[in-house]
Image (spheres, rainbow, N blue to C red):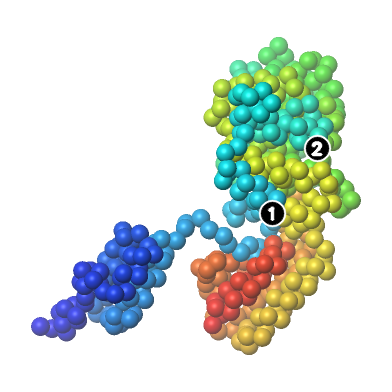
Amino acid sequence: MNKKQKLLSTLPSVDEILKGKICVEWLKNHPRRYVLQAIREVIDSRRKEIIDGIDTDLSLEKLSADIERRIEKLSSYSLRPVINATGIVIHTNLGRSILSERALENIKRVSENYSNLEYDLDAGKRGKRYSHIKGILRDITGAEDALIVNNNAAAVLLCLNTLSKGKEVIVSRGELIEIGGSFRMPDVMVSSGAILREVGTTNKTHLYDYENAISENTGLILKVHQSNYRIVGFTEEVSIEDIVNLGRGHQIPVMFDLGSGCLIDLRPSGIYNEPAVQEVVKSGVDVTTFSGDKLLGGPQGGVIVGRREYIEKIQKNPITRALRIDKLTLAAFEATLMEYLDEDKAKEDIPTLKMLFQRHAEIRERAEKITMLLKEFLRDARIEVIQDSSRAGGGSLPEMDFPTYVVSIKPDTLSVNELEWRLRHGNPPIIARIKEDSLMVDVRTVRDSEIDSLVNGIRTALS
Ligand SMILES: *Cc1c(COP(=O)(O)O)cnc(C)c1O
């Protein structure tokens, strides 16, 4: 027997490990199929290492530890919390908005009990799920009526399909946008059955461009928020007021896809080009759509507000049934919207707004605290607090820099790419960005409750 054969013969079989005492523990806490799979995989990889002549630890302790790690990996959730140290508040890849306490409590309350989701308690008969948010949306936005569907993409599709199927929709060329996740206005238009009638040029669209395009077959005039891009320089766009007047004159409905859907006045915070939903409704737009999980700070959803005759028509569209939101979303939405009845409270209690508008000094204190905690343990890395800027994200407020403080870490014993990789593979994963040879931990999006995990994660990654 050569050396390899000898080593192979010392490898335990799957059955032997299954009979072991430690396996009883594994089976108590994890599904049998994953325990078996982990044992097989670890033994197979050991066998391969032996055959390839790689020096490998065949002790039972090491084998068990590897199997256990594998079992834990196999039976852990795929979708799980991460620490967002990017400073991007509405980070689409990291789940966009985090919900408020109140929204979370309401999800639990509604989903652990039966509810009046589609039951009219006054009448004692079948009701409508949408009835629960109509009142509050009317109160906050001033619109006559409202509806919520699965997301804003669905809201746009549904409105176009209901109001302009087989008809032309007039849109400025400067607003034929593509946003993340392959939402492209011209493609959505095709899917909805509406016919795109683009007017103007990329940088300039005049009122007469819209006017000249109006025909017998015009079903809708659409304005689209440019979201994640801006045209600067020699530009012109038509105000929503002028478009509304034009639509009125020709009895053509006007729709505004607002994208983010901000429910508070941002002007006191120095942001002048993000109209609040209330203002858009007031300008007389017939139908306005916006997201639930961007600046609004609620769950994923697409809100449609506007004139009752149109909302009723949209609600009756058979496609609405396919795009309907579930009760968990409704519960979170109603609770989030309730926060807006007091704007100051909304800014305090809705995490998205709180992170965007937190005081500069507060961010700095958090960065300094994290730095201090890290310095207690780490000597072989250069750690300092520096000024930088964060982004709103999610296609919202793209030209805004939000001044922030970041903890900059320059590792001495490993590369910054290796550090970034280790943090991303930690538990919980920490997502941060690299700038030159430093790792930037933007603490705008790190909550106080995450500081300990963040510090531990960085310590582990650096050691
Ligand atoms: C984000 C956005 C959408 C899509 O909204 P979702 O809620 O992500 O589906 C549509 N239109 C505009 C202008 C947007 O900014």
Where does residue 14 sit, x and y in percent of width and height?
Answer: 23, 69
Between 276 and 193, the residue placed more toward the observer is 276
Tell me what residue is drawn at x 69 percent, y 62 percent: 445
Residue 56 screen position, x and y as percent: 29, 81
Find residue 406 and report its horizontal and vertical position in percent: 72, 70
The amino acid at mark 2 is: Ile
Instruction: Tell me: residue 254, above or below residue 457.
Output: above
Horizontal arrangement in the rendering, residue 2 relative to residue 208 (left or right): left
Can residue 125 be seen by looking at this rendering? yes
Residue that carries the numbered disc 2 in the rendered image: 140
Which sits earlier in the primary sequence, circle 2 or circle 1? 1
Q: Categorize mark 2 by other alpha carbons within 10 Å: few (<14), some (14-19), many (20+).
A: some
Q: What residue is disc 1 on?
A: 101
Can residue 173 be seen at all in this image of the molecule? no
Classify residue 64 by image quadrant: bottom left
Provide the secondary structure element on which disc 2 rests: helix
